[in-house]
Amino acid sequence: MKVSIRKTDKRYTGSDIFGFVVDISHSSFAIIHTKLNKSQKLKKFHEVRDWCIQTWGMSCEREHYLQMSADEFDVNVHWCWHTEYYDTKIYLRSEKEANWFKLKWL
C-alpha cells in the first residue's frame, strides 16, 4: 500500500478548514482491483485512522465534521476522515499535523 499526503485545494470539500489530505492507494502502478486488494487498502486506512485517534483524539466523518462545525459544535481541531465506498481519505488541519503524520508514515 502507498500512503501519500498533499495540500488541499478547491477540489476538496473542506479545503477552507483542512490544509492537507492523506490518500491510501494500492501502489503507483495500475493493478487489478480484487477483493483482497480492497481489503488491504481498508486495513491500511484503519491503521492510519487508529493512529490519528491515538495521536489527536476521536474525530468523525468529514461531512459530519463540516456540519457540526458550521452549527458551532465542538469538533476535533486536528483531523477528520472521509470514506465513500473504497475511496478513503484522512484530512489534516495544518502543517503541524502534516509534519507529525510524515514522521510516522512516510
Image (cartoon, rainbow, N blue to C red):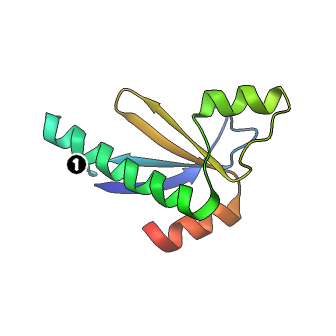
What kind of element bears circle 1? loop
Q: Is residue 99 left or right of residue 2?
A: right
Q: Is residue 103 left or right of residue 98?
A: left
Q: Which residue is mark 1?
A: 29
98 left or right, relative to 32: right
Query: Which amino acid type corresponds to the residue marked 1 in the rendered image?
Result: Phe
For image coordinates 44% across by 56% down, the residue present is: 48
Q: Is residue 8 visible?
A: yes
- Name, please, the residue furthest toward the bottom: 103
Q: Position of residue 82 (x, y in %)?
A: 52, 35
* Quadrant the N terminus occupies: bottom left
Point out the image quarter for the C terminus: bottom left
Residue 97 placed where, x, y %? 65, 62
Quadrant of the image occupied by residue 101:
bottom right
Q: Nearer the viewer, residue 22 or 36?
A: 36
Give the quarter of the image for residue 11: top right
The crowd level at tag 1 (other Cα within 10 Å; few <14, some 14-19, many 20+) is few
Residue at image coords 74%, 50%: 77
Count of numbered circles in the view? 1
List x then y, in percent, for residue 25.
Answer: 33, 46
Outermost right residue: 72
Is 40 located above or below residue 101 in the figure? Answer: above
Of the pair 69 and 103, the residue shown nearer to us:
69
Q: Where in the figure is residue 39, as x and y percent of width and height?
A: 23, 41
Q: Residue at x 69, y 53 (%)?
A: 78
Tell me if residue 32 can be seen: no
